[in-house]
Image: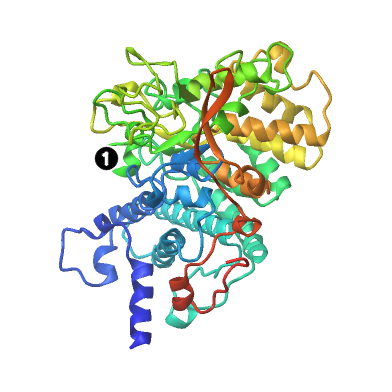
Amino acid sequence: MKRSLLLIALISLSLTGCEKFLDKSDPQATSFIEFFNTEEDLRRVVYSSYLDVFMQPTDRRILFYMADGRSDNGYARIETDYHQIIANGNFNSNSRAAEYYWTLYNKHLGRLNTFIANTDIPYVEDEAVRQKYKAILEGLRVWHYFQLTFHWGDVPFILTPVTLAEATIPATPKAEILDKLFPMAEDIASRLPEREGTTNAYMFNRNSFKAMVMRYALYNERYDVAARLAKEIMDSQIYQLHPVYNDLFSYKADKTNKEFMLKFDMESHNNSATQSFQHLGPHYRTGSGQSYLVPTKSLVDSYWTLQGRTIDNCPLHTKQAYELNPALNRDPRFKASIISHGDKFGAETINVYDANSPMHYEKVRGSKTGYWFKKFVDEADAFRTGGNMHFGIIRYAEVLLTYAEAKIMLNDVDELAKDCINQVRKRAGLDMKVADVKLAGKSQQEWKDLIRNERRVEFAAEGLRYNDIIRWKIAEQVLNQPVLGHTRLVDGNVESLKVEDRKFAPHQNLWPFHGSTLKVEPGLKQNPGY
């Protein structure tokens, strides 16, 4: 009986997914070939594989911007969104989050293996179409394995539809999996179209897939690979920095820029409404903002000055002056990314200490830190049930900063690496008479500090910070501090709003396997510390 239940569970993991995919014109279809026999079926397989894991606009557990709630950048107020417990150290082998994410990725890997093995079945007019979709599916499989190995380390590595015995094999060492994934990715990239089409723009093309592989090459300390891929993307001259930073995250440029490489566009979720205002925005009058994810004081203080100096190393103002007035002489990305006490929202001035205001910090839908993300919060969505915003999962700015970081880690900071940082800083609006990184020599540690902070402020609220603090091995430092918020003078004393205490142990750099997962998959071994 147990064996039968296990078999049913494994089949469910490998074949279930986006329910809409199976909503065919023939509801009586019972065999694989009955619902996978046309070019449109093949396209819908790809569509559902993106939607369920990467481009679902309403599921806060998997939305890319919500992932900042796992880090020192943000506080996610709903425990069942899972980001909060990851950040505050309550993530363990009994947490449903562990079961949810492991099942999510493996369910889709099972589906991908099945569909990739059968891509020769659907009829297509043009064989090139079949090969493009097959390469995209293979690219998605690589992306899944990059996620799994980053979070769990050693995992089972399976590239074919599995039998019961094969599904319970021991884990493959992470290094061995990566040694296979990177060459595999190079082959996949060579089979993808160089540019996106007018439709299906959310699907991998050669350069957006290279950018994804580049990201995980950097994460896994394959710096030569990361630098090479970044350089290849730059040399393609297809993408460019959008001239106005803050317009990227509103309706001013979300659909017209040439910076978004991997796109979370409306087509990627069948034009269903986006909810970024509800998720991130303030509760303005009767508007829909829920403040599910809000910035921390730690993030606010990480914005350097207009001249590119840290706020505790600037001759123009004291650190306390900067803390009390975050907009003072600051990197313009601060005002483009964060809404604060005293700012205007609509026609009103925000006062997070006014108990009669819907934006009071103690209100359920208020920000406990007294800050909100401005990115993806367009006032046009304030009183609508949803929006139609496009998001960039990978931006060209990441290519530039990845090249720079890879060269820094290789201790080979060439002129191109410096130019890459300067391009990002100049576009942001820094005073390049002082902020130009070529003006003074730096040690490797100074370069590391600079590029790490540059990534933090450039990509705030874009879901990269958690993975960065894990790979840099600084999570045990930055997540073992209280979450603080807006800072003010009270009776002459500096006080900051306090949200919660956090704790982080070194073993939490890897995620646990849930207890139920270990029962179903006896080939797995629990990660140390859990």
Percent across and percent down for residue 131 are 44, 54
**Which residue is tagged 1?**
272
Q: Which residue lies at the image location 58% right of the left edge and 54% below the top edge?
A: 185
Residue 197 in which image quadrant: top left
Q: Which residue lies at the image location 76% right of the left edge and 37% below the top edge?
A: 408
Percent across and percent down for residue 405 are 70, 37
Q: In this view, does 423 lie above or below 29?
A: above
Query: Left or right: 95 with respect to 56?
Result: right
Q: In which quarter of the image is the N terminus?
A: bottom left
Residue 325 in which image quadrant: top right
Q: Is residue 396 above or below residue 121?
A: above
Three-letter code, disc 1 = Ser
Asked which secondary structure carries label 1, the reply is: loop
Q: In this view, does 451 lie above or below 251?
A: below
Query: Left or right: 331 with respect to 292?
Result: right
Percent across and percent down for residue 312 are 71, 23
**Does residue 181 show up?**
yes
Q: Which residue lies at the image location 29% right of the left edge and 25% below the top edge?
A: 382
Query: Left or right: 527 with respect to 197?
Result: right
Q: Which of 78 and 397 is in front in this view?
A: 78
Percent across and percent down for residue 209 are 53, 45
Q: In which quarter of the image is the C terminus?
A: bottom right
Decide: few, some or many residues near mark 1? Use Cα within 10 Å; few <14, some 14-19, many ≥20: some
Q: Which residue lies at the image location 36% right of the left edge and 49% below the top edge?
A: 51
Q: Which of 468 and 528 is in front in this view?
A: 528
